[in-house]
Amino acid sequence: MNRKISLLPYIREDIYGLDTKSGQFYGWEIQKFEIQKYWKYSMGEGVKVAVIDTGCDLEHDDLVANLLPGYNFVNEGKSPIDRNCHGTHVAGTVAASDNNLGMVGVAPRAKIIPVKSLDDNGSGDLKSVARGIVWAADNGADIITMSLGSPRSSIVMEKAINHAASKGCIIFCAAGNSGPKTDIMYPARYKNTISIAAIDINLNRTSFSCSGPSLDFLAPGKDILSCAPGNKYAKLSGTSMSNPFAVGCAALALSSVGKKLSREQLIKAFKKTAQSLKEAQYSGKKNYEGYGIIHPITPNHLLNI
């Protein structure tokens, strides 16, 4: 029997007052992490990111310039359109265009490959997700991002991730939103992934983030403004939101040196700038903070890795 997999729980707040025609909004995470400073090295050019999720708004003003052909594993033969919001929001956090409209992503010139492996309710089966991973790896993805999870391991999923890793893909996964007393979810727990938990605007660990010895980094994941279907915008909170921020940082890094990097090389580079949590009860404990809060890196951080 093919087991189910689903989106991680998240909180949504629709934004109705964002004027998309008279300027561009910079989210707190873009400002606080000074993302614009790193755009002098790259803006994600040449990097392809496969978003395995609920699909994407294929006509959103902030995304359309950065979309590549994708695939729909829920309804094969149809476009990977998103009627949920989650996949569109993830795509926007990674690569919403720097176009003086709406908002901007971390890597605004990276390309998004939308892979619809979850239905409009945010659920799917492991086979569809695994097929999406393999398809993305075989169709040019440099990075694969998944903000979905299950408390149980799957041989099918692990084989797909190992296949993608063998193709040179770097795979990012959200840690899960069941709180610090719960181990991080699968697929984030697999060794060939990079797992991401969430912090808030004060750089404190969110109360919803899962923990565990397999956790790698934390990133902004609370009150994140990004794209929503229908050319709209919404604020979402969850490790589903912190994961694409980290993916955007990785896209900037790969683009800045113009070459493939391994998971191990990227982790080694990000460890150079990672920031420890301030809270005494978490700081220095890998099962709570991994290597720390992820930050963008320059080409110099990628030397001698």
Image (cartoon, rainbow, N blue to C red):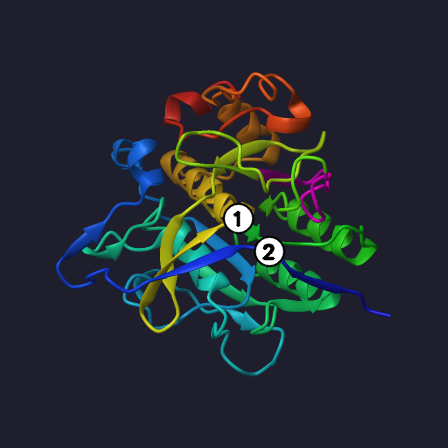
- Mark 2 crowdedness (10 Å alpha carbons): few <14, some 14-19, many ≥20: some
Is there a contact, CB below 8 Å, between mark 2 and mark 1?
Answer: yes
Q: Earlier in the sequence, mark 2 or mark 1?
A: 2
The magenta stretch is 182-196
The span from disc 2 to disc 1 (Cα, nearest Å) is 7 Å
Vertical placement of 76 versus 225: above or below?
below
Whole-percent x, y for residue 119 in the image:
60, 73
Q: Amino acid at mark 1?
A: Gly
| Residue 118 in the image, given as x and y percentages of width and height | 61, 68
Question: Which residue lies under the disc numbered 2?
Answer: 9
Looking at the picture, which amino acid does disc 2 mark? Pro
**Residue at (48% x, 53% y) in the render:** 49
Which residue lies most toward the bottom here?
A: 77
Q: Is residue 129 left or right of residue 60?
A: right
Give SS at disc 1: loop
Is 266 inside the magenta-drawn segment? no
The crowd level at tag 1 (other Cα within 10 Å; few <14, some 14-19, many 20+) is: many
- What residue is at 45 percent from the left and 25 percent from the top? 302
278 or 243: nearer the viewer = 278
The residue sitting at 48% across, 72% down in the picture is: 82
**Kind of element beneath mark 2:** loop
In the picture provided, is 138 more to the left or to the right than 161? Answer: left
Q: Which mark is residue 238?
A: 1
